Image: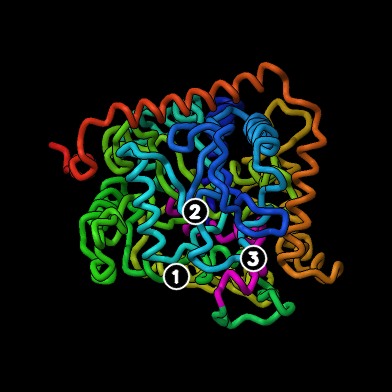
Amino acid sequence: MYQLADERLSRLAAVDGDCLHGGGRGVEKESLRVTPDGRIATTPHPAALGAAVAHPWITTDYSEALLEFVTPPLDTCWATLQFLCDVHQFVYPRLPEGEMLWATSMPCAVGGDASIPVADYGTSNVGRMKHIYRLGLGYRYGRVMQTIAGVHFNYSLPERFWEVLGEVEGRDGMDRAFRDDMYFGLLRNFRRYGWIVMYLFGASPAVCKSFLGGRDPGLPEFDASTWYGPHATSLRMSDLGYRNTNQAGIHLSMNSLQEYIDGLEHAIRSPWPPYEKIGVSAGGVWRQLSTSALQIENEYYGYVRPKQPIRSGERPTLALRRAGVAYVEVRALDVSPYDPAGVSQNELRFLEAFLVFCMLHDSPPLAAAEMEQLDANHARVAVAGRDPRLALDIAGRHQPLVAWGREICRQLAPICALLDHGDPSRSYSAALELQSAKLEDPALTPSARILAEMRQESESFFGFARRMSQQHADYFAALPPMSSARLDEFEAEARRSLETQQALEADDDESFEDYLARYFATPAP
């Protein structure tokens, strides 16, 4: 079943054992700012952190309270996690007194949509667009859903890998079309096998009742304030979270870059009756950017995306059309409550090896029916992944989850060995061993550990999350001070971002309506 991946890996190793070293590894981690009693903070984005509209590392996602930390692409998992920890250490003492960062993906103590402040990016056209887009998300999906936090892993293969792969495949490794095809093969295989990420790292098996606003999710009660899935791994990625039925009618092909771009463009330009009822504005006040199925590309909730860094004012689809795929963004990760930074090196190393597997393995085109089947696999794992009876569908056959997971991990072993080339600590192989153990004993998964700890401590999900949030705040407070050079770097970036925001607001010389029309204008071919 995995013969092509084995052959490719053997040929790569024979040419250059270091060909997987390097590349880019980046993390985007979201965290809600909360008050000491665990409620979503209503204070503005702290000025000491800089301007969210212009800071490359510290910004906001949907809400003014939903911080997003972004690392640059770095060449080792260790360097990426260290940068992420540095961001946390810089941020904590600059939060309003008593506030802390929520340690889980799912929020608690939510007082409905009205309690959630939408992110504010100032008065510039770009800032207004970001704000209005978020208003639109609130009208379309509800503000409460937008408070869910996650971790995104960004990964690009190193240049040397492309040189060697081109040599062993008889292709030009520098050819953009070749790289795009390989990255899209990765994307399709992530749709096939990405359920394992939710099983291994899902950390949202329970949800506060306040999050659902009185709705009955059809789950058992854990206690008076908590719903839970006895075998759930990631309710964040279920129909209660980002697997949103509003987007069920949007079907994007992963069979080629062109088909993917065409699908996004169609969704951005196609009116959607429920959103037409909302309207673009009411009483002269903007509600959303458009009445199309998607306001902008980023509205589409996919498990994984192809990405290309954008230029100022450039839409993501145009960046992909201009320069092809530069990296992939994995979006299926819950915030880990057991790691102060929300993610661990072992998690990143496993993901890196898994993405290499997805690229090297045979990846035929996906028909619409197969994509629906694969999405159903993800949904099953999200709500019942630890059920020992659970089986998934692949290529017309039923496969028990554990047996399938073992197959995948066996395929990852030689990839981890190549990633470990020259490293006596075998860090990638060790990371794989830790994850493989979760298939043999589901009690080792984060989702099972959370429920077991809640039972042991006789606490609700809210109680567990608040306790872990305080532990993380204490952890960063106890660290040795940052180096003066690092501190100067962060403070300088905060000042620069504030100056950039002022310049954006001062330099706008067109109306917002004209700015928006120009942003969405179809460029000449």
Please give the range of residues in magenta: 187-213
| Residue identified by numbered label 3 | 109
**Label 3 Cα crowd, 10 Å radius (few <14 / some 14-19 / many 20+):** some
Q: Position of residue 183 (x, y in %)?
A: 42, 42
What is the total number of numbered labels drawn onto the structure image? Answer: 3
Q: Report the disc number at residue 190.
A: 2
Say what amino acid the circle numbered 2 marks: Phe
**Label 1 Cα crowd, 10 Å radius (few <14 / some 14-19 / many 20+):** some
Q: Position of residue 5 (x, y in %)?
A: 52, 46
Say what amino acid the circle numbered 3 marks: Ala
**Label 2 Cα crowd, 10 Å radius (few <14 / some 14-19 / many 20+):** many
Of label 3 and label 1, which has the lower sequence position? 3
Lateral position of residue 95 relative to residue 256, left or right: right
Of label 2 and label 3, which has the lower sequence position? 3
Residue reaching furthest to the top: 485
Residue reaching furthest to the front: 283
Q: Quadrant of residue 282?
A: bottom left
Judged from the image, the secondary structure of the residue bearing numbered disc 2 is: helix
Say what amino acid the circle numbered 1 marks: Gln
Of label 2 and label 1, which has the lower sequence position? 2
| Residue identified by numbered label 1 | 373
Residue 287 sits above or below residue 53 on the image: below
* Residue for point 54% across, 55% down: 332
* Residue for point 64% across, 64% down: 108
Q: Which numbered mark, 3 or 1, is in the foreground of this view?
A: 3
Q: Quadrant of residue 525?
A: top left
What secondary structure predominates along the stretch shown in magenta?
Answer: helix
Contact (Cβ within 8 Å) of mark 2 with mark 1: no
